[in-house]
Amino acid sequence: MSAPTALMPVPRALERLLAAARPLGREQTLPLSEAGGGWLALPVSARVDMPPHDNAAVDGVALRFAELGEAPLTLPVTLRVPAGAAPGELAGGGVARIFTGAPVPAGADTVLMQEDCRFTEGAVTLPARDGVEAGQNIRPAGQDARHGDTVLAAGARLTPMALGLAASVGVPELTVRRLRVTILSSGDELQDPAEAPRPGKIYNSNGPLMAALLQQSGFPDVTPLWLPDDRAATDRALDALLADPDHRPDLVLASGGVSVGEEDHLRAALESRGGLAFWRLAIKPGKPFTFGDLDGIPFFGLPGNPSAVLVCYLTLVLPFLRRCLGAPEALPMATPVAAGFDVPRAGKRQEYLRVRRLWRDGLAVLEKHPNQSSGMLSSAVWAEGLAVVPVGRTVQAGEPLDYYSFADLLA
Ligand code: AMP
Ligand code: MG
C-alpha cells in the first residue's frame, strides 16, 4: 500500500480529470423516440428551412398592405388558405382568408388578425392603413433555421427541446455516443434489497444509486457486479472485465474498497496493475476518491458511503464524462445563494452540504440538512442540491455560497 499523501485539492483533481478525458464508447444511430437524454456524436444539420415558408402567425386575413385605404375598406375574399395548404397566389384587389401556420400566398405581404376585420358574405371590411404595420403577423421562412444550418453541435445533450428542434428540421434519427459502464459494488456486508435481511449485512444502495445516476446522465447501458472484500477475488473480477475484448466496458465505476482499511482491496488491485493516477482528495464527503486507468479503461473508485458516492459522481465523474463526450461545458454553473446558517470552523476539505432553498422576503436562502453524515441518503432526498464551502472558509449567515441544484448538476 502506498503511504497516504497530502490531500489533493478539488480544483486540481478536476484539472487532472479533464486533462485525462478522451472520446469514449461507440456511435449508435437511434430514432428520436430512443435518443432522449443521450449525447450527440455527430452534429445535426437542417434538411429544410424552418419554417419552410412565410406563414401566418394568427387566424385572419392576408392582403397587400398597399391596398389598404385611408378609411376602412371592403374587399372580396378570393382565396382561402388553411394550415397545410400548398402556397398559392393572391390576385390583386382581393384578400385571402388565412389560418395560423398557413403559408402566406404570393402577392400578400401583411396579415391582419380576424378580430380587427369584419366578415360579411364573401367579403371582409378591413381597418384603415393607420395602425397597421406592413409585414405584420408573418413568420418568415427560415426564422428558426435555414436549410444546411447546424442546429445541434456534436456533444450536445439531447433534451426534449433538442429532440423537438431535430424533428422540426426533418431529422428523424440521431447519432449518439453510447458507453458501456460496469458498476462494481464492493463489500462483504452488502446484500441485495430483494433478500431478507441477514445479521451483520446492509443493503446495497450504491449499486442502484450509481445505475440511476448514470441512467439520468444518458448512459443506460450498465452492468452491476458485486465484489467481496478479498484481494484474490478482486483480481479475478478485474481480469474477467478485461478478458473479452468485444465486451470490455468503456468505464468502470466502483464504490467502496478504496479507503485505507485492511479490507479495502480495490485501490491496491488497481495500483498493482500500474493504473492508479491519483487518490485522496480534499473533499467532504468523499476523501478516498480514486481515479485511474484499468488497462486503458477509465476507473473511478468512489468511497463506500452513499452520500459520498452522490457528491463524487456529480462533481467529479460527470464533468469528466461531459468532457469525454465533447459537451461545450464540462462544469456546471454555480448560483450564489445566501447561507441561512453559520459555518463557524474553517475546514481542511472542500465541503458539499446537502441543502435546499427557502424563500424569505422574496429572496432565496439556503437551509442545510441538520445531519450531513456521509452514510445517509435521506438528507440527500430531502435536499434540492449542494452548497460548497471552500477549504479554509468560515461562513456567516447571509453570506453567499456557490449553490448547485441537483437538476443543474445532472444537466
Ligand atoms: P468502504 O469505503 O468500503 O470502507 O465503505 C464505507 C462505508 O460505506 C461502510 O459503512 C460501508 O458499509 C458502506 N458501503 C460500502 N458500499 C456500500 C453500498 N454499495 N451500499 C451501501 N453502503 C455501502
Ligand atoms: Mg468496504
Image (spheres, rainbow, N blue to C red):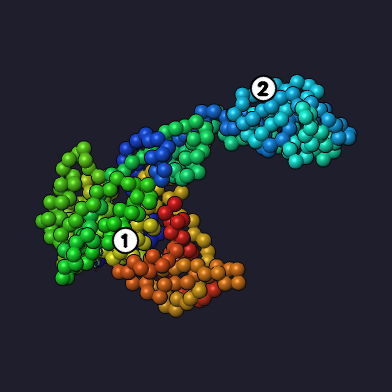
Amino acid type indicated by mark 1: Val
Residue ID for mark 2: 88
Label located before the other in sequence (2 or 1):
2
Q: Is residue 60 above or below residue 332?
A: above
Q: Which mark is residue 186?
A: none
Residue 332 in view, yes or no: yes
Count of numbered tags: 2
Q: Nearer the viewer, residue 65 or 75?
A: 75
Q: Is residue 364 above or below residue 220?
A: below
Q: What residue is rendered at 22% in x and 67% in y? A: 202
Residue ID for mark 1: 309
**In x, y percent, where is residue 173?**
42, 33
Ligand 1 placement by image quarter: bottom left
* Front position among marks 2 and 1: 2
Quadrant where the N terminus is found in the figure: bottom left
Q: Nearer the viewer, residue 237 or 96?
A: 96
The crowd level at tag 1 (other Cα within 10 Å; few <14, some 14-19, many 20+) is: many
Residue farthest to the right?
Answer: 70
Badge 1 residue CB within 8 Å of ligand 1: yes
Residue farthest to the front?
Answer: 121
Q: What residue is rendered at 83% in x and 37% in y? A: 127
For residue 268, side relative to residue 283 (left or right): left
Amino acid type indicated by mark 2: Gly
Q: What residue is rendered at 47% in x and 40% in y? A: 163
- Dot 2 falls on a residue whose secondary structure is loop
For residue 198, side relative to residue 108 (left or right): left
Q: Is residue 46 above or below residue 339?
A: above
Picture quadrant where residue 135 is located = top right
